[in-house]
Each structure stands twice: as structure tokens, then as C-alpha cells.
């Protein structure tokens, strides 16, 4: 079966034990190596491919991820729809750790990343439309699945993509808030734009791992992030199991 659906797993989701794994495939692309082998399997009766964004052993920081290779490899496998799972910090008052959020907008603050396939040897310059950075229909399916499961989820929010790998300063978070951002992560871009360039439907399930810098007293530790994410992954896995069967091939 050709996998028409891909799941890109972020921090806290480097493996997907609910996937009935059929085989692993090491891929190479004109842009280099993807973050991890593609794990082919079956979830809810659908052929699905899983990719670990930060590598199988979570060793790739956000600015070192080869986003182009990841998206290119999935596209070459026949993937048409991508569900991206990503850890974020919560900025808006209702974005507490543990909440799932389905962003509908992005502000991109990243720099220095390879952010397009339309770069060299062009016969014409291409500007993709990115008014709606996430696929509305795929996002709606995710929201519907979360509702069916009774999960606490935020259905509309703006994702700030920061360069990392360091976390933000309190002043940076205040600025993001003024800019209208509700959650902050480091991997949402250029991933979403590259999927659009390849014509793949793409939507994200953001998992709030911590309050963003300055939102509560004290510092943010990796231990806190990891423990909050560990507590949320059962919800994410349930969501994936609920949504995947509803994603008909295009
Ligand atoms: N900032 C940026 N990225 C993140 C955060 C954060 O606070 N938490 C998890 N990913």
C-alpha cells in the first residue's frame, strides 16, 4: 500500500508504538538525508509513514533539521497529507502545559534555514500562496477527532516559529504576544511552507510542553518539558488513531 498519510513526530514522539510497523526505509534525497528512516506501518486500517523530526534518538536540534530532505522524502513516498506533531511553549493564558492546540496561522521568525525548493535552476520565480498556512480540511479533521475524544484542545491560535535552539527571553515572548502569537515552537517553519510547495496537505497538532519564558516565575527546564510531554503523548496517540481512518486518499 502506498502511504498517503505521514506523521512527523516531534519532541516526545520519536517512536509511535501504536503503528503496526511493516518495515523501515532509509531514504536519500537531492537535499541530503532525512532526519530518520521512514517507518512504514498501519494505523486504523490505513498505510501510514512515520518520520522522527529530531532523529530516531532525538539528537537533531531544530536548526539542524533537514526540513527539505524530510518533506521531499515523504513526497517521493507518495504522501499527500502530513500530520505534524510539535512541542510548543504556551503564551496565551489558556495555553497551559498539557493542552493540545491546532494552529491556524504562523508568524515565522526563523532565519538561515533552507526554506524553499524554488531556489536554483528555475525557469521562473515561484511564490506559493500561504494565506492559510495549514490545510483547512485536514485541520478540521484533527479538531473533529479531538472533540470526539473529549480532549481539551484549542481550536484556533497563531504559532510563532523561533530559531532556537535556546528558549526565548521574557522580552521576546512579550513581543510575540504583541504580534498576536499564542504558542511558540522551533520547528513549524519551514516545514509547513515546504509541504505547501510540494502540494501536500499539512496540519499541526501542537502539544503545550511548558509556559513560555516569563509567563510564570522561574526558569524552564528540559526535565519539565519532557515530563509534561510524556503526560500528553497518550492523548496525541489517541488523536492520531481517531483521525487517521478519516483521512481518505486524495
Ligand atoms: N519555546 C520554543 N519552543 C518550544 C518551547 C518554548 O517555550 N517549548 C517547547 N518547544
Image: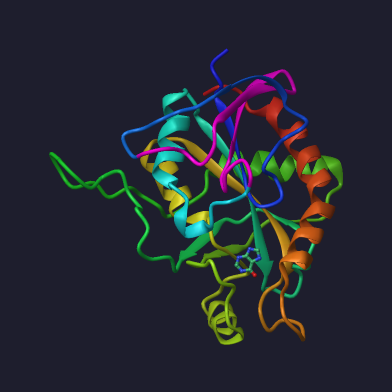
**At 38% from the left edge and 36% from the top edge, which residue is drawn?**
198
Residue 194 is situated, as x and y percent measured from the top left of the image, at 40, 45
**At 82% from the left edge and 55% from the top edge, which residue is drawn?**
152
Residue 91, quarter of picture: bottom right
- Most foreground residue, 46 or 10: 10
Could you tell whether 131 is left or right of 105 in the image?
left
Indicate whether 71 appears above or below 223: above
Could you tell whether 136 is left or right of 126 in the image?
right
Residue 118 is situated, as x and y percent measured from the top left of the image, at 26, 45
| Span of residues in magenta | 32-57
- Most foreground residue, 58 or 139: 58
Check if residue 70 falls in the magenta segment. no
Residue 208, quarter of picture: bottom right
Identify the image quadrant of the N terminus.
top right
- Most foreground residue, 58 or 31: 58
Q: Is residue 115 visible?
A: yes
Q: Is residue 99 visible?
A: no
Check if residue 41 falls in the magenta segment. yes
Residue 16 is situated, as x and y percent measured from the top left of the image, at 72, 35
**At 39% from the left edge and 43% from the top edge, which residue is drawn?**
68
Residue 66 is situated, as x and y percent measured from the top left of the image, at 43, 47
Q: Which colour scheme is used?
A: rainbow
Amino acid at each position: 500500500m502506498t502511504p498517503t498519510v505521514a506523521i512527523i513526530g516531534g519532541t516526545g514522539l520519536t517512536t509511535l508504538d501504536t503503528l503496526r510497523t511493516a518495515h523501515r526505509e532509509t531514504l536519500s534525497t537531492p537535499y541530503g538525508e532525512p532526519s530518520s528512516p521512514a517507518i512504514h506501518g498501519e494505523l486504523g486500517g490505513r498505510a501510514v509513514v512515520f518520520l522522527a523530526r529530531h532523529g530516531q534518538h532525538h539528537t537533531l536540534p531544530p536548526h539542524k533539521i533537514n526540513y527539505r530532505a524530510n518533506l521531499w522524502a515523504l513526497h517521493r513516498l507518495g504522501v499527500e497529507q502530513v500530520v505534524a506533531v510539535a512541542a510548543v511553549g504556551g503564551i496565551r493564558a489558556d495555553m497551559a502545559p498539557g493542552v493540545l492546540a491546532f494552529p491556524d496561522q504562523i508568524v515565522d521568525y526563523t532565519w538561515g534555514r533552507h526554506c524553499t525548493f524554488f531556489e536554483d535552476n528555475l525557469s521562473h520565480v515561484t511564490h506559493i500562496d500561504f494565506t492559510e498556512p495549514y490545510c483547512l480540511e485536514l485541520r478540521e479533521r484533527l479538531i473533529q477527532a479531538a472533540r470526539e475524544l473529549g480532549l481539551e484542545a484549542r481550536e484556533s491560535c497563531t504559532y510563532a516559529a523561533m530559531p532556537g535552539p535556546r528558549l526565548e527571553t521574557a522580552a521576546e515572548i512579550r513581543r510575540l504576544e504583541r504580534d498576536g502569537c499564542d504558542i511558540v515552537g522551533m520547528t513549524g517553519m519551514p516545514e509547513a511552507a515546504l509541504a505547501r510547495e510540494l502540494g501536500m496537505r499539512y496540519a499541526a497538532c501542537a502539544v503545550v510542553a511548558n509556559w513560555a519564558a516569563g509567563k510564570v516565575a522561574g526558569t524552564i527546564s528540559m526535565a519539565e518539558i519532557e515530563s509534561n510531554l510524556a503526560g500528553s503523548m497518550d492523548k496525541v496517540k489517541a488523536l492520531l488513531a481517531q483521525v487517521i481512518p478519516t483521512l481518505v486518499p486524495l
